[in-house]
Image (cartoon, rainbow, N blue to C red):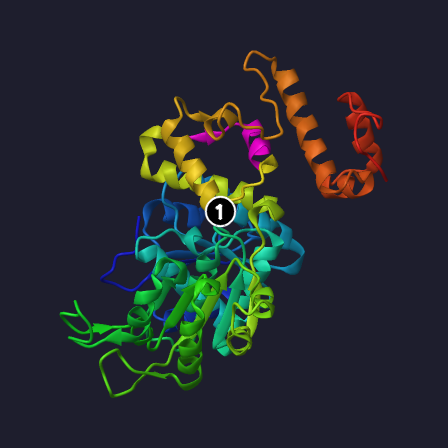
Amino acid sequence: MRCPPDRKPRLCLIEDDAIMGESLAQLFSLEGFDVSWYRTAAAARQALLAERYCVVVSDIRLPDMNGGDLFLELVTQQPALPPFLFMTAYGTIDRAVELLKAGAADYVTKPFDVDSLVQKVRGLAEIYGAGGEADDISLGVSAAMRRIAESLPRLARHASALMITGESGSGKEHVARLFHHHAVGSTGEFVAVNCASIPETLMEAELFGYEKGAFTGAMRAKRGLFEQADGGTLFLDEIGEMPLSMQAKLLRVIQDRRFVRLGAEKPLTSDFRLICATHRDLKAMVEEGKFREDLYYRIHVIHLRIPPLRERPDDIRWFVRHFIDEFNRQHPDERRRLDPRTEQALLSYSWPGNVRELKHAVERACILASGPVLGPEAFFDNGQDVGLAVQPVSASLADYLMACERDYLMLTLERHGGHMTRAAEALGITRKTLWEKLRRLGVSKGDEQITG
């Protein structure tokens, strides 16, 4: 259910505190929302199952039911639930993060910045109303990606140049689009170009544009990317692949915000935000003479590094569930779900193609699966070693659960370098309990690299 395009965006507010609820209802009404305010989870549940909303703003602590539990319940009942933004106190942040992993869109901590809250809600409503999913603007649930997401509104208010680095497929363009989404006063478009995909002979024409007859084949005038990005954001992906000759011309445009179309005499101006991205080490390229030093320092004002997917296992889990949910929404008659042990196989794989590879793997598994349950064999070729043996279907339930528990404990130990105390803390149990579990599962200190 999408927001009707011909009326005010409808907002469902779930808040039991009378003063807070009235203030928020007035605030969002003044911001152009049609607000429905509910003080209990029961009343909100009935409305959400019967009415269409563009976004839900909910407190976690409600008198009759936890707001998070209400969301988890509705997820199973509504195939296209509107984005949920939770308001949470500092002591329940962990609960909010759990809800993000389950599919919630975002959360704010009390006391919250009103302008930031309005911006988040408006962004969610716009994307959901346009036919996208709320999670499409989320970067993930890991601590690293949440820090990046939280920094983008502040950076978008002040920074005119942003450098994003990270491996191919890690989500650099997604971060750039979210930066543009938060840009205050932006009236233009998000214009993206991959510098590695444009032949050197055509790059100048693509960036600057050209007049009719400027060269053989120029049958009409064309606006260049600088011109198209006026008032908006220009995203130059793989900037490290740009030829040195074009780097000098790019530097001049960045400094003066003026350029001339090929075949023209009159200069044009363009006011744009610049975002550059690369998977290469530009500093090393500068030292090797392959990248201009003056351009490097001009575009390297603010630097964001996107960690590879293998460094953020929480995001692997979240993205897998998100992509499966996306498939289930599009194909309700072919619903898929993940085998518990498949998740461990996916976590043990290094994902060199990062989020892009993971998304394609999930799509392929959902399409080719012969049944509703996705096992490891649906994601990986038979000869591919993912570091996890698949438990036979004929195993008893007790053996199956024991194998799942052993694999999870060993995976946690590996992530903490075999350190028992740190692994126990991550698992939320005592060191003694962890050791007893390992002994029961047949793991001894002599078998594994276990310390601490």
Q: Which residue lies furthest to the bottom in this view?
A: 266
Camera sees residue 91: yes
Mark 1 lies on residue: 355
Which residue is painted at 55% across and 70% down in the image? 289
> In front here: 327 or 265?
265
Residue 160 lies left or right of residue 271; in this view the side is: right
Tell me if residue 24 comes above or below residue 72 in the rendering: below
> In front here: 269 or 323?
269
Tell me if residue 373 comes above or below residue 166 in the rendering: above
Q: Mark 1: which secondary structure?
A: helix
- Magenta extent: 336-346
Q: Residue furthest left?
A: 219
Q: Main secondary structure of the magenta part?
A: helix
Which residue is painted at 52% across and 72% down in the image? 155
Quadrant for residue 109, please give it.
bottom right
Q: Where is residue 143 in the image (x, y as percent from the top left)?
A: 62, 54
* Residue 240, magenta (yes or no): no
Across the whole image, how many numbered discs are drawn on residues? 1
Q: Position of residue 178 (x, y in %)?
A: 44, 63
Residue 42 lies left or right of residue 448; in this view the side is: left
Tell me if residue 26 comes above or below residue 10 in the rendering: below
Quadrant where the C terminus lies?
top right
Q: Which amino acid does label 1 sit on?
A: Val
Residue 305 lies left or right of residue 130; in this view the side is: right
Q: Where is residue 217 in the image (x, y as percent from the top left)?
A: 16, 67
Q: Where is residue 153 in the image (x, y as percent from the top left)?
A: 50, 69
